[in-house]
Amino acid sequence: MKQVSILSSAVAAALFSQSTMAAVITGQVLDKNQQPISNAEIHVHGKSQSVVTDKQGQFKIDVDNKGQLHISKNNFIDKRVAINGEDQNVVVTLTPTSVETVVVYASALHKNSLEMISPVNVLAGDELKDKAKPTLGETLKGLPGVNASYFGPVSSSPIIRGLDGPRVKITQNGLDSSDASRIGPDHATSNDSLAAEQIEVLRGPATLLYGSGAIGGVVNVVDNRIPTDNIESLTGAAQYTHDTVSNTNTYAAKLETGNDGFNFHFDGTKRKGHDYDTPNFELPEEQEEHEGEEHEEHETANSVENTFIDSQTVNFGTSYVGDHLTLGVSFGRIETDYGIPAHEHHHHEEEEDHDEHEGEEEHEESVFAQLEQDRWQGYMSYALHDNWVENISLRVGYTDYKHAEIEDGAVGTVFTNKTTEARATVEHKLGLWHGMAGYHYTESDYDADGEEAFTPASVTKTNALFVLEERQFGDVTVELGARLEDYQIDSAVSMAEHHHDHEEEEEHHDEEEAEIINYSEDFTNLSLSAGAIWQYQEGQSVALSVSRSERAPLSAELLSNGIHIATGTYELGLGYHIEDGEIHFEPEDIEQETATNFDLSFRRFIGDFGYTVNFFYNDIENYYYQQNTGLVFDEEHGLESAADADEDAMAVYQFTSKDAKLYGIEFDVHYQVTPSALVKVFGDSTTAKLKDDEGYLPRIPANKLGSELQYTVSDWKFSLTGTHYFEQSDITAYETKTDGYTLFDASANYQLDLGPVDTQLYINVDNLTDELGFVHSSFIKEKAPLPGRNFSLGIRGYF
């Protein structure tokens, strides 16, 4: 295998490379007032090991060649200092910044969030802990340009600039999360934000390194399950939170230790909660009819049935970190049971207190998902520091994912996905160019069995080569990138899946329905990018990037043919054609989705006033999306006109491809009013429509505008956030508009002095005014409004 040969080459390089005399770099890090900065991080560019400054701002680090020191500290602008490979002393002065600077691991070239050409958001530290929710979508939805698909609070995926599903790549430490969340909105992501060190949201050219599934963006969850720095003592953290809106208790813990280059990591979370409460809302009409009885008055509800969660995650990791070589391996296990709203049976509607449902009794009365995932990861990094090769690294992963839907206590549909992935990279310097080249391999074996198996089993393989290069011209940094990807999909499509005859014709067509079509298709996806950032003044920059990305359809977009009960629709893929009420499999002449994206960003991050403003325009040829055909599917009669069908018939949605354009703005402005008070204003606007005046795209998130006030006094930190989601009336056929709403959130955090344990008490109040809000991007918006007022009470400690 290619990854084995890469590893062998690295080991050979370690054995036969010429060693150089070691040197010691000492120094001090100061602020502009010449005061020492403690806990600043220093590492040699290209190496993962790092040291931190002491209380006097002093540090000492060993080097074996000339290169570059990278000095970083929260709330200061990063600095890089050239070193000559000999003993020397350096004094570094850092300039304060008005926003937090964080190294973006998904950037590939060790850039921090202020140096990125592509727009990026990073949640880290206490801000991440305060905003962490059971799903990535709910955790990230407050960021400019980011929204959530919202299939209830336990199944909610990120939407970036109006794009979601297969266009948003979700990774964990740079490798695909390998779950089934890209197949349907009712499938939860398998990433837990509580165990994360930081979560990165990338748009634009930087995403092409992660594959054709990253046209919309990349969400990278970074954790320390494979430690890449030496851990010299036992450290850890623990957290407990109680949410009142769903009576949910969450426990989380982390332990890390190490000795003589060997490091160990453990983290685990446990979350258990019940159906969540909402402000009083009217149930949709179809939920008001029970056993043929029609109600003259609208029925109302104040909770959303079948939204419980019972989840456990555990991660173990170990590594060896030497002067040149880092090796590590990790194992993670996820077990989650969660309810699927709008998918429940109605025979328990007479039960008034849904919070009393416990354990198996609740599970037997509802349809719920049982998610299990085992995930192995390996990591190798070797720092050479020769004339042109700086570092060779390899990440490998194997994921065994299973998602079973339980109906009345029995297994209904089972989705499985076994994924093997390898990413090998070589970081290098060629003259004045610094960059990274690599090879990326994935193989995904997907299967579905049961009533809701609307997508047939398939095997998808990708082999890709990519390169990213940058060069500095004075105050301007230029970045060029390219990715060439071979994408192959194989599936056995049963004729029974697309042939719907009346009962009296079934026997006649038994043999025909048993016929299997072996479908195989190969696509070549080429993606290119170019961008530049101009630091025209200290702490101020403007960035421009252009990218062209190709994407082949996923199996769900291409081969779906069946009832998707969770969304209440009958889904058809691109490979099918409807003629005279019959469905035919004709997957010819399917072209790749091709996106040409322009990004223009203005940033100021120095002094008391700062901002980030991004303008984007995305021109997409052959945009894949689900279109209402105007037909319905009835199990007895097959396809028929909606006018002639029973009320229980399901609308038929088919994937089609048309040219589209998406454009908009996202911004984040902040002002440090006093040393204790900070005000932020943020928002985003996305317009998404088909070309040639064919209308708007479906389920595009509403625009939002918000403001946040942060105030610190002594050991207290307070915040108040208000976000207005505007009415969404830019809708497509068969779609209804969604009213606007405003959410207010508040939090208070108190720092306790408990000796060696850094302890925080906190209370967060979400939806302070108990506002009723419906999410336009949700498939079940009328059945699952947002949660009502919620008090989150908790304590966290670090040692």
Image (cartoon, rainbow, N blue to C red):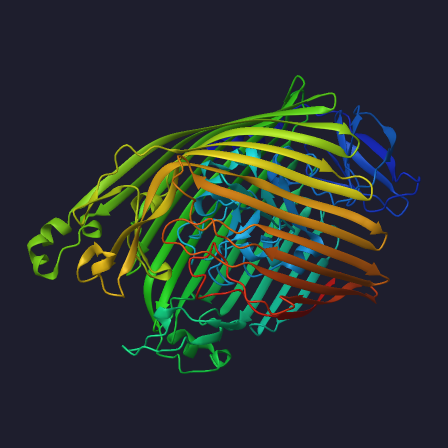
Kindly identify the residue that appears in the image at 33 percent across and 51 percent down: 447
Location of the C terminus (image quadrant): bottom right
Q: Where is residue 87 shown, x and y percent of the image?
A: 85, 28
The quarter holding residue 558 reads top left
- In-image side of 208 versus 128 (left or right): left
Image height of 362 relative to 134, above or below:
below
Q: Residue furthest left?
A: 508
- In-image side of 48 versus 561 (left or right): right
The quarter holding residue 753 reads bottom right
Asked if residue 628 shows in the view, the reply is yes
Kindly identify the residue that appears in the image at 84 percent across and 65 percent down: 755
- In-image side of 296 versus 612 (left or right): left
Q: Where is residue 430 shown, x and y percent of the image?
A: 63, 19
Kindly identify the residue that appears in the image at 45 percent across and 51 percent down: 699
Front residue of this view, candidates 404 and 90: 404
Q: Where is residue 328 shown, x and y percent of the image?
A: 59, 45
Location of the N terminus (image quadrant): top left
Q: Residue furthest top?
A: 431
